[in-house]
Image (tube, helix red, strand yellow):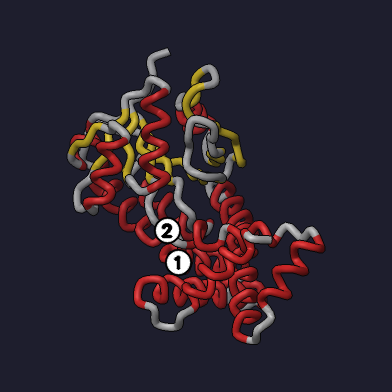
């Protein structure tokens, strides 16, 4: 089988690691670093990824992966759809971003109106390494899913599963999973901060350790998990709020979590409330239990 040529939009922690995984599995991978930070460009070099311009990425790829912060997903998709509509090459565009089914439907319509190939997907798990390979769930037409499955070859490449035949199923899975996973981190963060303010943190962590409650492990990893990610969780939580129902209690829960993550991210950068320092203290104390 001739392996498809891969183009990737987004060279953050996940996008670059996915690119490296595909290169190590024998795929031709190119990325677009236009407007990217020095940190992202360094990551691309460290991962030995080939760089090119946006237009060359569109004209020389068989499959395009969009792995960008959720707030950029629609903008990137709009740019790609507009440019692809005037090109002879019509690659499969796979949107792997953490957005709601409603947002993915709007993105899908951009491609459908222009008779372009589109697949809804999501990534569950941490960036791929030598010992870890996250799962890509995809939903869409059988033909497009089969094309995407070519990124897995005899145990190499990506770990791909089917979420359903309808666009939106993969995004719904991501919203549900993230709502639980990142929601729990928010609850642990909020309650440990509150406990610290009232002098009860040591007692809380001690009780979590004695009770064998798994949230102690979350407390141990708060700063490692939130440090590089909290800034983009706010938008994702608002997408989950829309998914759960804006006007319902469930939606209100995730709007509150979105505001909480925004505040934590701002404090980490500007030390406005001192809450990030509290979370650092929480992680240190939790790891001593």
Image quadrant holding the C terminus, namely: bottom right
Is residue 143 at all visible to an observer of this figure? no
The residue pinned by badge 2 equals 228
In x, y percent, where is residue 82? 25, 49
In x, y percent, where is residue 18? 42, 37
Closer to the camera in the image, 233 or 193: 193
Q: Residue at x 75, y 65 (%)?
A: 208
The Cα–Cα distance between marks 2 and 1, rounded to whole angstroms, is 15 Å
Residue furthest to the right in view is 211
The residue pinned by badge 1 equals 235
Q: Residue at x 28, y 47 (%)?
A: 80
Residue furthest to the top in view is 1
Q: Residue at x 24, y 42 (%)?
A: 32
Q: Is residue 225 above or below residue 24?
A: below
Q: Is residue 251 left or right of residue 126?
A: right
Closer to the camera in the image, 214 or 139: 214
Label 1, secondary structure: give it: helix
Marks 2 and 1, the one that precedes in the sequence: 2
Quadrant assignment, res 269? bottom left
Q: Is residue 245 left or right of residue 15?
A: right
Residue furthest to the bottom in view is 198
In x, y percent, where is residue 136? 53, 39
Graded by Cα atoms within 10 Å as few (under 14), some (14 to 19) or many (20 or more), the crowding at tag 2 reads few
């Amino acid at each position: 089988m001739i392996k498809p040529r891969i183009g990737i939009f987004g060279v953050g922690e996940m996008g670059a690691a996915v690119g490296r995984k595909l290169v190590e599995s024998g795929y031709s991978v190119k990325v677009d670093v236009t407007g990217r930070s020095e940190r992202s460009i360094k990551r691309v070099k460290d991962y030995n990824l080939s760089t090119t311009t946006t237009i060359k990425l569109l004209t020389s790829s068989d499959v395009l992966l969009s792995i960008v912060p959720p707030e950029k997903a629609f903008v990137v998709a709009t740019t790609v759809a507009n440019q692809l509509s005037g090109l002879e090459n019509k690659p499969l565009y796979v949107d792997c971003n953490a957005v709601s089914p409603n947002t993915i439907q709007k993105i899908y319509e951009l491609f459908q109106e222009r008779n372009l190939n589109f697949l809804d997907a999501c990534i569950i798990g941490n960036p791929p390494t030598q010992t870890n390979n996250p799962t890509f769930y995809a939903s869409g037409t059988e033909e497009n899913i089969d094309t995407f499955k070519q990124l897995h070859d005899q145990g190499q490449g990506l770990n791909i599963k089917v979420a359903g035949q309808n666009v939106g199923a993969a995004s719904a899975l991501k919203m549900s999973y993230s709502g639980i996973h990142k929601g729990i981190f928010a609850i642990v963060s909020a309650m440990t901060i509150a406990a610290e303010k009232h002098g009860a943190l040591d007692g809380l962590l001690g009780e979590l350790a004695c009770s064998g409650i798994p949230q102690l492990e979350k407390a141990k990893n708060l700063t490692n998990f939130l440090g590089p990610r909290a800034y983009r969780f706010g938008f994702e939580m608002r997408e989950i709020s829309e998914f759960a129902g804006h006007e319902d209690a469930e939606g209100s829960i995730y709007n509150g979590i979105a505001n909480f993550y925004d505040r934590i991210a701002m404090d980490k950068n500007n030390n406005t409330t001192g809450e990030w320092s509290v979370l650092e203290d929480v992680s240190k104390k939790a790891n001593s239990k």
